[in-house]
Image (cartoon, rainbow, N blue to C red):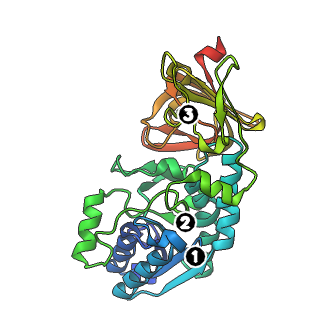
Amino acid sequence: MSATRNSLGIAKPPRETRVVAAMSGGVDSAVVAALLKREGYDVVGVTLQLYDAGAAAKKKGACCAGADIHDARRVAERLEIPHYVLDYESRFKRAVMDEFASAYAAGETPIPCVACNEKVKFADLLDTAKELGADALATGHYVRRVEGAAGAELHRAADAARDQSYFLFRTTREQLSYLRFPLGAMEKPQVRAIAAELELSVAAKPDSQDICFVPDGDYARVVSRLKPDAARPGEIVDWEGRVLGRHEGVIHFTIGQRKGLGLSGNEAPLFVLKLDAANARVVVGPREALRARSVALRDVNWLVAPQVSFECAVKVRSTRPPVSALVTPHESGASVELLGFEEAVAPGQACVFYDGPRVLGGGTIVRSETARAAA
Protein backbone atom coordinates (compact mmCIF):
# COMPACT_ATOMS: atom_id res chain seq x y z
CA MET A 1 0.00 0.00 0.00
CA SER A 2 1.51 3.35 -1.04
CA ALA A 3 2.14 6.05 1.53
CA THR A 4 -0.07 9.13 1.55
CA ARG A 5 1.46 12.00 -0.38
CA ASN A 6 1.80 15.44 1.18
CA SER A 7 0.89 18.75 -0.45
CA LEU A 8 4.16 18.68 -2.43
CA GLY A 9 3.36 15.25 -3.85
CA ILE A 10 6.02 13.51 -1.77
CA ALA A 11 5.20 10.29 0.08
CA LYS A 12 6.24 11.54 3.51
CA PRO A 13 4.63 13.53 6.31
CA PRO A 14 5.56 17.22 6.06
CA ARG A 15 7.67 17.11 9.24
CA GLU A 16 9.86 14.43 7.63
CA THR A 17 10.15 16.30 4.32
CA ARG A 18 13.05 18.71 3.97
CA VAL A 19 12.52 21.52 1.46
CA VAL A 20 15.09 24.11 0.43
CA ALA A 21 13.37 27.43 -0.21
CA ALA A 22 15.26 29.70 -2.61
CA MET A 23 14.97 33.10 -0.88
CA SER A 24 15.87 36.08 -3.08
CA GLY A 25 14.88 38.65 -0.47
CA GLY A 26 11.59 39.46 -2.18
CA VAL A 27 8.01 38.92 -1.07
CA ASP A 28 7.31 35.92 -3.34
CA SER A 29 10.10 33.68 -2.08
CA ALA A 30 9.44 34.83 1.50
CA VAL A 31 5.82 33.69 1.27
CA VAL A 32 6.92 30.35 -0.21
CA ALA A 33 9.13 29.72 2.82
CA ALA A 34 6.37 30.89 5.18
CA LEU A 35 3.68 28.67 3.65
CA LEU A 36 5.93 25.61 3.78
CA LYS A 37 6.87 26.35 7.39
CA ARG A 38 3.20 26.78 8.31
CA GLU A 39 2.40 23.39 6.82
CA GLY A 40 5.03 21.79 9.02
CA TYR A 41 7.79 21.10 6.48
CA ASP A 42 11.46 21.06 7.46
CA VAL A 43 12.38 24.27 5.64
CA VAL A 44 15.90 25.48 4.93
CA GLY A 45 16.28 28.95 3.40
CA VAL A 46 19.07 29.56 0.87
CA THR A 47 19.98 32.92 -0.66
CA LEU A 48 22.43 33.32 -3.52
CA GLN A 49 24.78 36.29 -3.67
CA LEU A 50 25.03 36.65 -7.41
CA TYR A 51 26.98 39.84 -8.00
CA ASP A 52 28.77 42.68 -6.26
CA ALA A 53 25.97 44.70 -4.74
CA GLY A 54 27.45 48.18 -5.29
CA ALA A 55 24.91 50.61 -6.71
CA ALA A 56 22.40 47.85 -7.34
CA ALA A 57 21.96 47.33 -3.60
CA LYS A 58 20.58 50.87 -3.36
CA LYS A 59 18.13 50.47 -6.24
CA LYS A 60 14.56 49.58 -5.41
CA GLY A 61 13.70 46.26 -6.99
CA ALA A 62 17.27 45.04 -7.44
CA CYS A 63 17.55 41.31 -6.84
CA CYS A 64 20.13 39.24 -4.97
CA ALA A 65 22.26 42.20 -3.87
CA GLY A 66 23.28 43.23 -0.34
CA ALA A 67 19.97 44.66 0.87
CA ASP A 68 18.09 41.63 -0.42
CA ILE A 69 20.34 39.23 1.46
CA HIS A 70 19.59 41.20 4.62
CA ASP A 71 15.83 41.04 3.91
CA ALA A 72 15.97 37.28 3.31
CA ARG A 73 17.85 36.80 6.58
CA ARG A 74 15.24 38.83 8.50
CA VAL A 75 12.42 36.71 7.06
CA ALA A 76 14.24 33.49 7.96
CA GLU A 77 14.67 34.75 11.52
CA ARG A 78 10.97 35.62 11.68
CA LEU A 79 10.06 32.12 10.49
CA GLU A 80 12.68 30.50 12.72
CA ILE A 81 14.24 28.48 9.91
CA PRO A 82 17.94 27.97 9.15
CA HIS A 83 19.28 30.31 6.47
CA TYR A 84 22.41 30.09 4.35
CA VAL A 85 23.96 32.64 1.98
CA LEU A 86 25.97 31.09 -0.85
CA ASP A 87 28.54 33.08 -2.82
CA TYR A 88 27.78 32.33 -6.48
CA GLU A 89 29.29 35.55 -7.85
CA SER A 90 31.99 33.94 -9.99
CA ARG A 91 29.68 31.40 -11.63
CA PHE A 92 26.97 34.03 -12.15
CA LYS A 93 29.45 36.33 -13.87
CA ARG A 94 30.80 33.52 -16.05
CA ALA A 95 27.50 31.83 -16.94
CA VAL A 96 25.18 34.85 -17.10
CA MET A 97 26.87 38.27 -17.23
CA ASP A 98 29.74 37.41 -19.60
CA GLU A 99 27.44 35.48 -21.94
CA PHE A 100 24.96 38.36 -21.89
CA ALA A 101 27.71 40.80 -22.92
CA SER A 102 29.02 38.53 -25.68
CA ALA A 103 25.54 37.99 -27.13
CA TYR A 104 24.70 41.70 -26.98
CA ALA A 105 27.98 42.57 -28.73
CA ALA A 106 27.06 40.07 -31.46
CA GLY A 107 23.83 41.96 -32.18
CA GLU A 108 21.50 39.72 -30.17
CA THR A 109 19.00 40.63 -27.45
CA PRO A 110 19.63 37.95 -24.82
CA ILE A 111 17.49 37.16 -21.77
CA PRO A 112 19.87 36.79 -18.80
CA CYS A 113 17.20 35.56 -16.39
CA VAL A 114 16.69 32.50 -18.64
CA ALA A 115 20.41 31.74 -18.38
CA CYS A 116 20.34 32.37 -14.63
CA ASN A 117 17.50 29.90 -14.09
CA GLU A 118 19.11 27.33 -16.39
CA LYS A 119 22.75 27.56 -15.35
CA VAL A 120 22.68 28.77 -11.75
CA LYS A 121 19.37 28.42 -9.89
CA PHE A 122 18.19 25.14 -11.42
CA ALA A 123 21.70 23.70 -11.73
CA ASP A 124 24.12 24.68 -8.97
CA LEU A 125 21.44 25.57 -6.40
CA LEU A 126 19.50 22.42 -7.17
CA ASP A 127 22.63 20.34 -6.58
CA THR A 128 23.24 22.19 -3.31
CA ALA A 129 19.68 21.43 -2.18
CA LYS A 130 20.28 17.74 -2.77
CA GLU A 131 23.55 17.92 -0.82
CA LEU A 132 21.55 19.37 2.09
CA GLY A 133 19.36 16.27 2.02
CA ALA A 134 16.31 18.09 0.70
CA ASP A 135 13.43 16.25 -0.96
CA ALA A 136 12.57 19.30 -3.09
CA LEU A 137 13.67 22.81 -4.08
CA ALA A 138 10.87 25.39 -3.86
CA THR A 139 10.98 28.79 -5.58
CA GLY A 140 8.73 31.83 -5.83
CA HIS A 141 8.24 31.59 -9.59
CA TYR A 142 4.71 32.04 -10.91
CA VAL A 143 4.37 28.78 -12.82
CA ARG A 144 2.61 25.51 -12.10
CA ARG A 145 4.05 22.03 -11.88
CA VAL A 146 1.41 19.47 -12.87
CA GLU A 147 1.75 15.71 -12.63
CA GLY A 148 0.95 14.26 -16.03
CA ALA A 149 0.80 10.74 -17.43
CA ALA A 150 4.51 10.86 -18.31
CA GLY A 151 5.66 12.74 -15.21
CA ALA A 152 5.92 16.36 -14.10
CA GLU A 153 4.81 19.02 -16.59
CA LEU A 154 5.43 22.78 -16.65
CA HIS A 155 2.26 24.87 -16.96
CA ARG A 156 1.51 28.57 -17.08
CA ALA A 157 0.55 30.24 -13.80
CA ALA A 158 -3.08 30.78 -12.89
CA ASP A 159 -2.40 34.54 -12.81
CA ALA A 160 -1.70 35.30 -16.48
CA ALA A 161 -0.30 38.74 -15.61
CA ARG A 162 2.39 37.16 -13.40
CA ASP A 163 3.14 34.02 -15.46
CA GLN A 164 6.89 33.32 -15.75
CA SER A 165 6.79 30.13 -17.83
CA TYR A 166 8.43 31.94 -20.78
CA PHE A 167 11.58 32.40 -18.67
CA LEU A 168 11.65 28.77 -17.50
CA PHE A 169 11.41 26.99 -20.85
CA ARG A 170 14.91 25.55 -20.42
CA THR A 171 13.88 23.63 -17.30
CA THR A 172 14.43 19.91 -17.90
CA ARG A 173 12.04 17.10 -17.06
CA GLU A 174 14.55 15.79 -14.52
CA GLN A 175 14.69 19.18 -12.80
CA LEU A 176 10.89 19.44 -12.80
CA SER A 177 10.66 16.20 -10.85
CA TYR A 178 12.53 17.93 -8.00
CA LEU A 179 11.23 21.51 -8.24
CA ARG A 180 8.11 22.91 -6.58
CA PHE A 181 6.32 26.22 -7.27
CA PRO A 182 3.86 26.91 -4.42
CA LEU A 183 2.67 30.24 -5.87
CA GLY A 184 1.61 28.88 -9.26
CA ALA A 185 -2.09 28.82 -8.42
CA MET A 186 -2.08 32.17 -6.58
CA GLU A 187 -2.42 35.83 -7.58
CA LYS A 188 -0.01 38.54 -6.46
CA PRO A 189 -2.45 40.43 -4.18
CA GLN A 190 -3.12 37.16 -2.36
CA VAL A 191 0.63 36.63 -1.87
CA ARG A 192 1.11 40.12 -0.46
CA ALA A 193 -1.90 39.64 1.83
CA ILE A 194 -0.33 36.48 3.26
CA ALA A 195 2.96 38.32 3.79
CA ALA A 196 1.13 41.11 5.64
CA GLU A 197 -0.89 38.62 7.70
CA LEU A 198 2.32 36.89 8.80
CA GLU A 199 3.99 40.27 9.45
CA LEU A 200 6.85 39.60 7.07
CA SER A 201 9.10 42.64 6.66
CA VAL A 202 9.01 42.38 2.84
CA ALA A 203 5.21 42.45 2.49
CA ALA A 204 5.21 45.78 0.63
CA LYS A 205 8.64 45.45 -1.03
CA PRO A 206 8.68 46.32 -4.77
CA ASP A 207 9.10 43.46 -7.24
CA SER A 208 12.59 42.64 -8.47
CA GLN A 209 13.71 43.50 -11.99
CA ASP A 210 14.57 40.85 -14.59
CA ILE A 211 18.06 42.16 -15.35
CA CYS A 212 19.32 42.51 -11.80
CA PHE A 213 22.90 43.47 -12.69
CA VAL A 214 21.87 46.49 -14.79
CA PRO A 215 20.84 48.83 -11.95
CA ASP A 216 20.12 51.88 -14.13
CA GLY A 217 18.80 50.17 -17.27
CA ASP A 218 21.86 51.18 -19.29
CA TYR A 219 22.66 47.89 -21.03
CA ALA A 220 25.26 49.42 -23.33
CA ARG A 221 27.31 50.72 -20.41
CA VAL A 222 27.32 47.30 -18.72
CA VAL A 223 28.24 45.54 -21.97
CA SER A 224 31.07 48.04 -22.60
CA ARG A 225 32.44 47.38 -19.10
CA LEU A 226 32.32 43.60 -19.49
CA LYS A 227 33.45 43.60 -23.12
CA PRO A 228 35.42 46.80 -23.83
CA ASP A 229 35.77 46.15 -27.59
CA ALA A 230 32.01 45.80 -28.11
CA ALA A 231 31.24 49.45 -28.98
CA ARG A 232 32.51 49.74 -32.56
CA PRO A 233 31.23 52.74 -34.57
CA GLY A 234 29.64 52.10 -37.94
CA GLU A 235 26.96 52.99 -40.47
CA ILE A 236 23.18 53.18 -40.30
CA VAL A 237 21.83 51.94 -43.64
CA ASP A 238 18.41 51.34 -45.19
CA TRP A 239 17.11 48.06 -46.58
CA GLU A 240 18.93 48.63 -49.91
CA GLY A 241 22.23 49.47 -48.19
CA ARG A 242 22.12 53.24 -48.66
CA VAL A 243 24.02 55.01 -45.86
CA LEU A 244 21.72 57.26 -43.81
CA GLY A 245 23.93 58.06 -40.84
CA ARG A 246 26.52 56.88 -38.31
CA HIS A 247 26.30 55.18 -34.91
CA GLU A 248 28.57 54.53 -31.91
CA GLY A 249 28.04 50.77 -31.73
CA VAL A 250 25.29 48.18 -32.33
CA ILE A 251 25.09 47.61 -28.55
CA HIS A 252 23.10 50.87 -28.37
CA PHE A 253 20.24 49.42 -30.47
CA THR A 254 17.59 46.71 -30.38
CA ILE A 255 15.31 45.26 -33.06
CA GLY A 256 12.17 47.35 -33.44
CA GLN A 257 13.72 50.49 -31.93
CA ARG A 258 12.43 53.78 -33.34
CA LYS A 259 13.73 56.52 -31.04
CA GLY A 260 17.34 57.51 -30.68
CA LEU A 261 18.42 56.71 -34.26
CA GLY A 262 19.66 60.23 -34.90
CA LEU A 263 17.93 60.34 -38.29
CA SER A 264 15.59 63.04 -39.53
CA GLY A 265 13.93 64.22 -42.72
CA ASN A 266 12.48 60.82 -43.68
CA GLU A 267 9.04 60.50 -45.25
CA ALA A 268 7.96 57.80 -42.79
CA PRO A 269 9.24 56.66 -39.36
CA LEU A 270 12.19 54.27 -39.49
CA PHE A 271 12.75 51.27 -37.21
CA VAL A 272 15.75 49.06 -36.53
CA LEU A 273 15.30 45.93 -38.67
CA LYS A 274 18.63 44.18 -38.22
CA LEU A 275 21.89 44.48 -36.29
CA ASP A 276 24.87 43.40 -38.39
CA ALA A 277 27.54 43.29 -35.67
CA ALA A 278 30.18 41.73 -37.93
CA ASN A 279 30.10 44.77 -40.20
CA ALA A 280 29.09 47.27 -37.48
CA ARG A 281 25.91 48.11 -39.40
CA VAL A 282 22.44 49.03 -38.18
CA VAL A 283 19.79 48.33 -40.83
CA VAL A 284 16.63 50.44 -40.64
CA GLY A 285 13.36 50.50 -42.56
CA PRO A 286 9.57 50.91 -42.37
CA ARG A 287 7.52 49.23 -39.67
CA GLU A 288 5.96 46.69 -42.04
CA ALA A 289 9.43 45.25 -42.65
CA LEU A 290 9.47 44.09 -39.01
CA ARG A 291 6.68 41.57 -39.61
CA ALA A 292 8.19 38.11 -39.27
CA ARG A 293 6.53 35.10 -40.90
CA SER A 294 9.02 32.43 -39.87
CA VAL A 295 11.61 31.95 -37.14
CA ALA A 296 14.71 29.73 -36.91
CA LEU A 297 15.73 28.39 -33.50
CA ARG A 298 18.82 26.85 -31.92
CA ASP A 299 19.42 25.09 -28.59
CA VAL A 300 15.86 23.77 -28.34
CA ASN A 301 14.84 22.23 -25.01
CA TRP A 302 12.00 19.71 -25.25
CA LEU A 303 9.73 19.07 -22.28
CA VAL A 304 7.81 16.55 -24.40
CA ALA A 305 9.07 14.13 -27.02
CA PRO A 306 9.35 16.16 -30.27
CA GLN A 307 7.16 15.19 -33.20
CA VAL A 308 7.99 15.45 -36.90
CA SER A 309 5.90 18.60 -37.16
CA PHE A 310 3.09 19.95 -35.00
CA GLU A 311 0.80 22.92 -34.50
CA CYS A 312 0.85 24.81 -31.23
CA ALA A 313 0.91 28.33 -29.83
CA VAL A 314 4.24 30.14 -29.51
CA LYS A 315 5.50 33.23 -27.69
CA VAL A 316 8.41 35.13 -29.23
CA ARG A 317 8.56 37.74 -26.46
CA SER A 318 7.62 37.58 -22.78
CA THR A 319 5.10 40.41 -23.05
CA ARG A 320 3.38 39.11 -26.20
CA PRO A 321 0.37 36.76 -26.17
CA PRO A 322 0.84 33.32 -27.77
CA VAL A 323 0.13 33.02 -31.51
CA SER A 324 -0.59 29.95 -33.63
CA ALA A 325 2.34 28.35 -35.43
CA LEU A 326 3.67 25.20 -37.07
CA VAL A 327 6.87 23.89 -35.42
CA THR A 328 9.22 21.53 -37.24
CA PRO A 329 12.14 20.07 -35.23
CA HIS A 330 15.42 19.38 -37.00
CA GLU A 331 18.95 18.35 -36.12
CA SER A 332 20.23 21.83 -35.24
CA GLY A 333 17.07 23.18 -33.59
CA ALA A 334 13.63 23.90 -35.03
CA SER A 335 11.86 26.08 -37.58
CA VAL A 336 8.65 27.92 -36.74
CA GLU A 337 6.12 29.01 -39.36
CA LEU A 338 3.84 31.65 -37.87
CA LEU A 339 0.23 31.36 -39.04
CA GLY A 340 0.05 35.15 -38.81
CA PHE A 341 3.00 37.43 -38.16
CA GLU A 342 4.90 38.88 -35.22
CA GLU A 343 6.73 42.21 -35.15
CA ALA A 344 10.30 42.89 -34.00
CA VAL A 345 11.40 39.27 -33.52
CA ALA A 346 14.93 39.60 -32.17
CA PRO A 347 17.79 37.08 -32.30
CA GLY A 348 18.75 36.01 -28.79
CA GLN A 349 15.18 36.13 -27.48
CA ALA A 350 13.24 32.93 -26.78
CA CYS A 351 10.48 31.24 -28.75
CA VAL A 352 8.44 29.07 -26.38
CA PHE A 353 5.92 26.41 -27.44
CA TYR A 354 2.57 25.94 -25.66
CA ASP A 355 -0.29 23.46 -25.81
CA GLY A 356 -2.92 25.38 -23.89
CA PRO A 357 -1.31 26.10 -20.50
CA ARG A 358 1.34 23.39 -20.91
CA VAL A 359 4.90 24.30 -21.96
CA LEU A 360 6.14 21.91 -24.65
CA GLY A 361 9.62 23.39 -24.95
CA GLY A 362 11.36 26.25 -26.67
CA GLY A 363 14.58 27.55 -28.14
CA THR A 364 16.72 30.61 -28.79
CA ILE A 365 15.87 32.71 -31.85
CA VAL A 366 18.66 32.72 -34.44
CA ARG A 367 16.89 34.78 -37.09
CA SER A 368 13.48 35.61 -38.48
CA GLU A 369 12.27 36.05 -42.02
CA THR A 370 9.82 38.72 -43.05
CA ALA A 371 7.31 38.52 -45.88
CA ARG A 372 9.45 40.99 -47.83
CA ALA A 373 12.62 38.93 -47.36
CA ALA A 374 10.82 35.77 -48.44
CA ALA A 375 9.40 37.38 -51.56
Mark 2 vs 1: CB contact within 8 A: yes
Whole-angstrom CA distance, mark 2 to mark 1, is 10 Å
Whole-angstrom CA distance, mark 3 to mark 2, is 47 Å
User: Can residue 126 be seen by looking at this rendering?
Assistant: yes
Which circle, 2 or 1, is nearer the viewer? Answer: 1
Q: Which mark is residue 129?
A: 1
Mark 3 vs 1: CB contact within 8 A: no
Packing grade of label 2 (10 A; few <14, some 14-19, many >=20) is some
Give the structural element (helix, strand or loop) at label 1. Answer: helix
Which one is in front, 247 or 311? 247
**Residue furthest toward the front?**
265
Residue at image coords 33%, 77%: 39
**Lower position in the chain sequence, tag 2 or tag 1:** 1
User: Disc 1 marks which amino acid?
Assistant: Ala
Apparent side of residue 221 relative to residue 23 in the rendered image (left or right): right
Residue indicated by mark 3: 261
Q: Which mark is residue 89?
A: none
Residue indicated by mark 2: 178
Image location of residue 306, percent across then percent down: 64, 38
Which circle, 3 or 2, is nearer the viewer? Answer: 3
Please state, as top left, top right, bottom left or bottom right, where the C terminus lies in the image: top right
Give the structural element (helix, strand or loop) at label 2. Answer: loop
**In the displayed structure, would residue 124 be above or below residue 339?**
below
Image location of residue 175, percent across then percent down: 59, 61
